[in-house]
Image (tube, coloured by chain):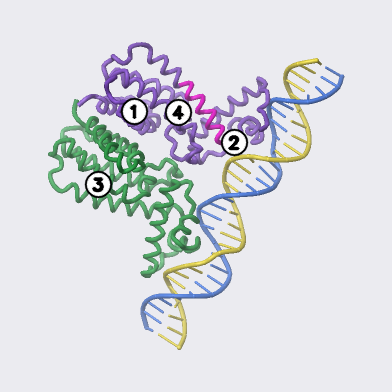
Chain colours: A purple, B green, C blue, D yellow
Amino acid sequence: MSPQPRRQERGQRRMAQLLDAAAEVFADTGYAKATTNAVATRAGVSPGTLYQFFRNKEALAEGLAERYQQALTDAHRRAFDSGLASLPLPDLVSRMIGPMIEVNIANPGFKALFTATDMPEHLGAPARRMHAAVVDRIAEVLTARSPDQPATDLRRTAVVATQIFGSLLGTIVAAKPADRSQWIAELERALVGYLSPG
Amino acid sequence: MSPQPRRQERGQRRMAQLLDAAAEVFADTGYAKATTNAVATRAGVSPGTLYQFFRNKEALAEGLAERYQQALTDAHRRAFDSGLASLPLPDLVSRMIGPMIEVNIANPGFKALFTATDMPEHLGAPARRMHAAVVDRIAEVLTARSPDQPATDLRRTAVVATQIFGSLLGTIVAAKPADRSQWIAELERALVGYLSPG
DNA sequence: TTCCAATGCGAGCGATCACTCGTGTTCTGT
DNA sequence: ACAGAACACGAGTGATCGCTCGCATTGGAA
């Protein structure tokens, strides 16, 4: 009901700080166990100040999801330059996965939202929107590659591919950097194997 | 410290009731959000009674995990009768997956423990043991099929296969029975694609 | 300078939840 | 029959956590 106040520059900075802190705390403990006071403390701010900018804990996730969706879109725009659909499958997979892994490593909180199973059900809307955006993008590419396939099948394939990706995200980002490329290779093998005809 | 009491038959029944109730509640709300009082109520019993039989919430998960591990072992013993390792890959995958899906559908709480990301970290020991048991079993079969492969690689492959399985479990058990076989087919395609050489 | 909105604080409220404890009831062995 | 152990109850305790509220400070527009 109360119209949100006209933010000053200081406020904008605070919001960014708070989102940074939230990302770290979510990454450390997961969304469910994360406490808003911990987020506030991490941001060097009092609980009251946090709620000056975010209606509730959910709104923090919402803000983060928005951020990440933007980062993903940017990363993919950079990667999906041209006739991606005509690339050999392994290259296609590699080109799609790369940016997502990067976004993930650069933003520790991403996985906590993307693979969240511990969110208050229908309140997990932001997480599901992020997921859906990824599925949409994959379905898009698949459609370009196989225009004759039924849309339903392509979508199902996209969902499965996204699940597979999500299931290995944790392992990949948690791995020591030395092992990381090996897990990434494994993820690519899995996706190529799944997506290749026959 | 206190040696556990000598259980009467009534007590055995209560423990089973409580585990049944816990499975349902975990399935409904996930482990983290499940309340012990809800479990007690669901079992038609007071909170105090619950704690007569289980030291804490974690012990409930422990008890359930034990149950499920037993069910899995049985199901797999039935499926892994003979020279499974020499079967064609699609058949092998199908034979391994079938029992796991069945156990899952028969025990609603299984997935909540198996794919739990919302457990208090290192307290998720029972869940991780279940996971490890599955990985071990897969690694075993893979070793029989490819005795010349390095054990490290086989284990990594087993881990990935388990992750892939887990990531689609939710979708499969949540699907309406009519769609279920389609998702299972998709899971099999994914695993066969991943495990087939080249 | 003046005034109001925006920002900031932090003690603490209300609700939730894992778990306890005092007490009473039922079983089992002798 | 009796004693002691196992079973059962459920109000209550202590801790946690999301969030609020009263009040102080800062910033910007006039």
Residue A73 left/right relative to D19: left
Asked if A66 appears above or below A77 in the picture, the reply is below
Secondary structure category for the residue under label 3: helix
Instruction: Kindly identify which residue carries mark 2.
Output: A56
Picture coordinates of residue A46 (x, y %)?
A: 65, 34
**Mark 1 → mark 2, Cα distance in angstroms:** 34 Å
The residue to which callout 3 is attached is B99
Mark 3 to mark 2 CA distance (whole Å): 43 Å
Q: Is residue B6 visible?
A: no
Question: What separation in Å lies between label 3 and label 4 (alpha carbons)?
Answer: 33 Å
Q: What distance separates the C-alpha of mark 4 from that of mark 2? A: 20 Å
Tag in front: 1 or 2: 1
- Quarter of the image for residue A4 reads top right
Q: Could you confirm whether marks 1 and 3 are on the same chain?
A: no
Which residue appears at 44% of the width and 36% of the height?
A116
Residue A155 numbered tag: 1
Tell me the kind of residue under disc 3: Pro
Gap in angstroms between the C-alphas marked 4 and 1: 16 Å
Task: Name the foreground residue: A194 vs D27.
Answer: A194
**Region rendered in magenta:** A56-71
Query: Picture coordinates of residue A170 (x, y %)?
Result: 39, 33
User: Could you tell me residue B14's position as x and y percent?
Assistant: 40, 64
**Which chain contains the residue that carries disc 2?**
A
Residue kind at label 4, given as amino acid type: Met
Residue B101 placement, left or right of A8: left
- Quadrant, the N terminus of chain B: bottom left
Q: Which of the two labelled residues, at mark 1 and mark 2, occupies the earlier sequence position?
A: 2
Q: Main secondary structure of the magenta part?
A: helix
